[in-house]
Amino acid sequence: MRVRLSYQLSITSMFVVLVLVVGLGLVVLSFDRARSITRSAALAFIDRVAEHTADRVDGQFKDVLDTLEVMAKLPAIGSSAIGNNPPLYAVMAALLRRHEQIYNLYVGYDDGTYLELDDLDQVGDAGRRQMGAPPGAAFRLAIIGAVLEERTRTQVTRYLSAELSTIAEAERETAYDPRTRPWYRTAFDADAGAVTDPYVPVFTPLPGYTVRLPFHDDQRGVVAGNILLADIGAFLRAQQLGTSGVVLLFDDRGRVVAHPRLAAFLHQRVPGGPLELPRLDQVLDVDINPPLDAWQAGGAAEQIFTGSADGRTYVAAFRSIRSAGSARLRLAVVVPLDEFFGEVEAGRRRLIVLALAFVAALLPIVWWIGARLSRSMKILAMETDRIQHFDTTSPPMTVRSLIREIDDLGRSVATMRTVVLTFARFVPKRLVQQLVTTGAALRLGGARREVTVLFTDIEGFTAITEKVAPEQVMIQTSRYLGVLSAAIMEHGGTVDKFIGDAVMAIWNAPADDPDHVARACAAVLACRTAIQELNAAFEQEGWPAYRTRFGLHTGEAVVGTIGSTDRMAYTVLGATVNLAARLESLNKDYGTDILVSAAVAGRVPERFVFRVVDTVRPRGFQEPIRILELCAARDLIPSASPEHRVG
């Protein structure tokens, strides 16, 4: 007789055996083995701390560089149209508000023109007094014109509110020339980095850096921003590394630029005077030069070494801050191993006690765990059933489990849901729902059925794309296609494909729709309204309007799947499709937006207003076709004139 255990009992037995083995193993582990594990754990921990901290510092510099790239690409910056340009100032203020580590942004040009915007909230009371900011001022704007024959120039300084309205304005002569400043003068050198040497601003004792980005547009220039390392210092203080562990940032000359207690080591100096940063041997009780030299010579980034002064064993990790460029910043994490080891040993003892206590209380707890795991299996079954019925409206149910197979199964079900939803974005949603519900596979072939086919196209789209960046064309056209798709699907249509800027949509396939002609007409009118609203938004954004032409026809066609065994497409083929495409292009000849065939107008004359346009013989067709313009829904025009009736 085959013995079968319940799921909960199996899980309970497995946990009992596992915990007993682990508990006994912890008891019999030797101290030397524990020490070896602890050393490895210390190296791994220090490595994670160093990597995380280096990524944080790297992120600050990269954020500033990204901000400068955005600023350099502004048309006003490239054309040096910086005087009396409120939209430019608004963008710069938004960038400052978004990146709190930057307290000012500025740009200089080869002709000496200069623009600077300071965030007064970031510089503190000392900085506000230094800059002469009146109460209520949130920003200081300074503009210096190009260098002419005169040796002195005028600097216009405006103090702006948080809403960028002018609170006060002053003019004075200035000899300041950005081209003579280090951040500008060396920016175009072949070996120039994005980050300059450290300096101490006049309003704080903490060091900062200038991050710069040269550009070549209508004229050459440099955009730059100043950042303080105060946030990094606070972050370093937050790293808990025992009682004497420390994380610090230093350059290749051994100068410490970020330390949890850096302010205590900095010497008092005259504002704007030479910077006196402490050196490594001044802030550390241990000499880290031996492991530092070994790392710089190609050794491991994580090392264990013995201090020459106190004889203690330390673990250290080093990282380079890649985004700092020519500033050549390094990160060091230094922790005495005995402190780390002591915490681990105490934790190990606590773990043994907890393991024994857990064994004593194991059965009821593990029984409950088994019940939870059983619940996970039930949730997975419910989720797969929802996927089978193509229920995409309910939120996904995520399953996470300690059992790898259950956890993998949960991830697989979540992936399957994502794949099905993604598949529905490339294949008509109703077709995907039909396949999932029936369990059938896609096969090549098709069947004849009546469909209503729509073709759209943007007038003059090629001329629009030649004048703007391809990335913007992609973004704006995707917005346009999204608006059309939403209107089509809202009226029961299926987007068959996107052909560049054109859309092909069908009704009455793959699912039956007895009212497909009327719903297609309503969809076209909804598309026209939606495009008008979108064009209004485009006009506000400075983007050209999209004038769209529509062609609509109904008739029999072959509906199905074409392609090869490894790549298929669900589509519609036949003369009905060709005529719909021809109607769309005929709009150009008649100056209309929406042309439909007599077959469409004859099916819904009581619900929509049509205007007879002409009788034509489209290219590729033998018989003449009567074409009409779809004007509006009849309920919107109570008494249509005779010229709008079909007859």
Image (spheres, rainbow, N blue to C red):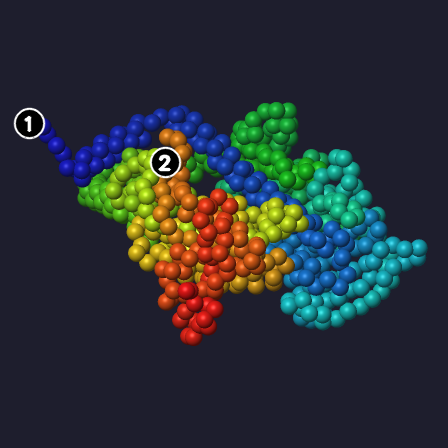
Residue 534 % position (x, y): 53, 60
Q: Dot 2 lies on which element? A: helix
CA gap between label 2 and label 1 equals: 46 Å
Q: Is residue 390 visible?
A: yes
State the image coordinates of residue 471 (x, y, percent, origin top left): 59, 46
Q: Quadrant of residue 535?
A: bottom right
Q: Is residue 168 above or below residue 5?
A: below
Q: Mark 2 belongs to which amino acid?
A: Arg
- Judge by depth and name the residue closer to the eye, 78 or 438: 438
Q: Who is closer to the viewer here, 558 or 394?
A: 558
Query: Residue drawn at (68%, 62%), measured in percent from left and top?
Result: 87
Give me the residue at 63% from left, 37% from top: 322
Q: Say which label, 2 or 1, has the lower sequence index.
A: 1
| Disc 2 and disc 1 in contact, CB within 8 angstroms | no
* Residue found at the very far left of the displayed protein: 1
Point out which mark residue 348 bears: 2
Q: Quadrant for residue 277, please give it.
A: top right
Is 207 displayed left or right of 601 in the figure?
Answer: right
Q: To which residue does mark 1 refer?
A: 1
The reply to whether residue 228 is visible in this rendering is no
* Three-letter amino acid code of the residue under disc 1: Met
